Image: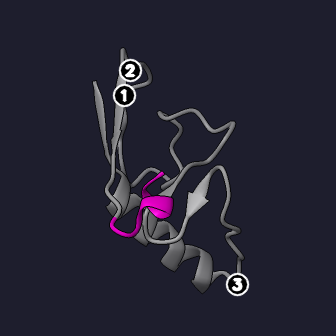
């Protein structure tokens, strides 16, 4: 099983993008401070240059995050 702390993942990715002068556009795969997903990148891909060791196979994965705001943002 794989459990992803979506809020932590998003915050760290936003800092990394800012550090590297990358612009993250809000849309289907990103909402500032809420979620970020990398389409086309397998969940077990090592994007950490070997700093985090992941098993090559996962049976199931869960991505957890939360959001606060008005009804429009929640939808």
Distance from the alpha carbon under mark 1 to that under mark 2: 7 Å
Give the extent of the magenta segment. Answer: 68-75
Image quadrant containing the N terminus: top left
Could you say where residue 73 lies in the image, as x and y percent from the top left? 48, 63
For residue 51, which quarter of the picture? bottom left
Q: Which residue is mark 2?
A: 58
Residue plotted at (33% across, 67% down): 68
Residue plotted at (63% across, 39% down): 41
Neighbourhood count class around disc 3 (C-alpha, 10 Å): few under 14, some 14–19, many 20 upward: few
Q: Is residue 45 above or below residue 47?
A: above
Residues marked 1 and 2 touching at CB (< 8 Å): yes
For residue 63, which quarter of the picture? top left
Q: Is residue 30 above or below residue 60?
A: below
Could you say where residue 17 lies in the image, as x and y percent from the top left? 61, 75
For residue 3, which quarter of the picture? top left
Image disc number at residue 21: 3
Distance from the alpha carbon under mark 3 to that under mark 1: 30 Å
Could you say where residue 39 lies in the image, as x and y percent from the top left? 66, 41
Residues marked 3 and 1 touching at CB (< 8 Å): no
Of marks 3 and 2, which one's residue comes earlier in the chain? 3
Give the left or right position of residue 37, taking residue 53 as reference.
Answer: right
Residue plotted at (36% across, 20% down): 60
Between 39 and 74, the one lying in front of the other is: 74
């Amino acid at each position: 099983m794989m459990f992803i702390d979506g809020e932590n993942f998003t915050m760290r990715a936003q800092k990394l993008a800012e550090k590297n002068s990358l612009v993250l556009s809000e849309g289907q795969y990103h909402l500032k401070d809420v979620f970020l997903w990398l389409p086309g990148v397998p969940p077990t891909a090592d994007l950490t240059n070997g700093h985090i060791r992941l098993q090559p196979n996962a049976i199931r994965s869960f991505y957890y995050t939360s959001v606060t705001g008005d009804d429009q943002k929640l939808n």
